[in-house]
């Protein structure tokens, strides 16, 4: 249960998105609180990525609205960063240049060298700053993307299944790292995943979606203590509960 005095960062009101005759998002409404790690799960193809693309105006909503701190979302004004499913490090740039590129795109030139250095240190890549992506492991490539995101000091971080291509050990290490960084910087996160265990491991709350036409089936508060133990009976019970919610959509 969230406290009434907590600040609402993102407000989704009656969001509807159709593609021709196909109704994907059907009158979806919920709030995201400042500093919250919100995970969104649901059946494959239910519209999780469509929601993020609507938030960032890659898609224009058919109806309803998404507000950021009470205003219409404006990517030129609001500090929002999007980490996609695919690796997005640029092969022709070094690690340092990749991280710097995010700041340059946002025209955030103040103390740019320090911000880049700090971001590389946060993700443990300071010693690899002059390496190229082809010289890095999969885990390190994702760290580059995370460093680029955190260098901009985003108020809202959107993550769309960023660890889907990694093995389980790498995934858990990066998940721990992102939670640590987000709590350290008070970054608000909306994290899309099809992996229920990942959602329970990461989320402060878990938003469970139905199949298309998609609406919210339930919002589950995840108050398990951190760091979380996937063998903890409470963890297993919550994972099973969410599995059942999705299974019986």
Image: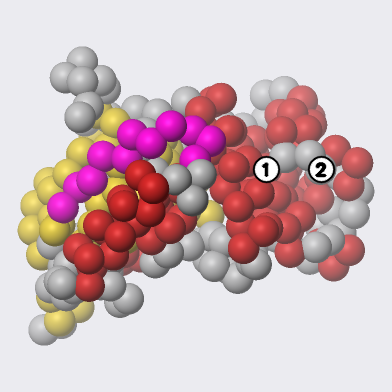
Magenta stretch: helix, strand or loop mostly? loop
Quadrant holding the N terminus: top left
Please indicate whether residue 49 sits to the left or right of residue 169 in the image: left
Mark 1, Cα crowd under 10 Å, few <14 / some 14-19 / many 20+, is many
Q: CA distance from mark 2 to mark 1?
A: 9 Å
Residue at image position (38%, 61%) is 196
In the image, is 174 to the left or to the right of 160? right
Q: Quadrant of residue 4?
A: top left
Which of the 4 quarters of the picture holds residue 217? bottom left
Q: Which contiguous range is marked in magenta?
A: 218-228
Q: Which residue does the numbered mark 1 point to in the structure image? A: 147
The color scheme shown is secondary structure
Circle 2 sits on which residue? 125
Residue 144 in picture, x, y percent from top left: 72, 50
Labelled disc at residue 136: none
Using a 10 Å C-alpha cutoff, classify the residue at mark 2 as few (fewer than 14 neighbours), some (14 to 19) or many (20 or more). Answer: some
Relative to residue 26, is residue 9 depicted above or below?
above
> Which quadrant of the figure has residue 10?
top left
Task: Identify the residue at image location x=16%, y=72%.
Answer: 248
Q: Name the outermost residue toward the front.
A: 233
Q: Position of residue 130 (x, y in %)?
A: 91, 48
């Amino acid at each position: 249960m969230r406290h009434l005095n907590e600040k609402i960062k993102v407000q989704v009101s009656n969001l509807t998105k159709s593609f021709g005759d196909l109704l994907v998002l059907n009158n979806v409404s919920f709030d995201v609180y400042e500093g919250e790690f919100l995970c969104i799960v649901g059946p494959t193809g239910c519209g999780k990525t469509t929601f993020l693309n609507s938030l960032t105006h890659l898609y224009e909503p058919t109806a309803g609205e998404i507000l950021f701190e009470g205003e219409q979302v404006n990517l030129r004004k609001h500090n929002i960063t999007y980490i996609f499913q695919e690796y997005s490090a640029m092969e022709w740039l070094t690690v340092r240049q990749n991280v710097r590129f995010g700041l340059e795109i946002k025209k955030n030139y103040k103390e740019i060298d320090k911000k880049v250095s700090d971001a590389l240190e946060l993700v443990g890549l300071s010693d690899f700053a002059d390496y190229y992506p082809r010289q890095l492991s999969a885990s390190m490539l994702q760290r580059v993307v995370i460093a680029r995101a955190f260098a901009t000091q985003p108020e809202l971080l959107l993550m769309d299944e960023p660890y889907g291509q990694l093995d389980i050990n790498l995934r858990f290490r990066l998940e721990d790292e992102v939670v640590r960084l987000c709590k350290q910087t008070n970054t608000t996160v909306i994290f899309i995943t099809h992996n229920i265990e990942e959602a329970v491991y990461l989320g402060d709350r878990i938003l469970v979606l139905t199949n298309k036409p998609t609406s919210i089936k339930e919002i589950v508060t995840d108050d398990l203590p951190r760091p979380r133990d996937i063998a903890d009976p409470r963890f297993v019970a919550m994972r099973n509960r969410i599995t059942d919610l999705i299974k019986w959509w």
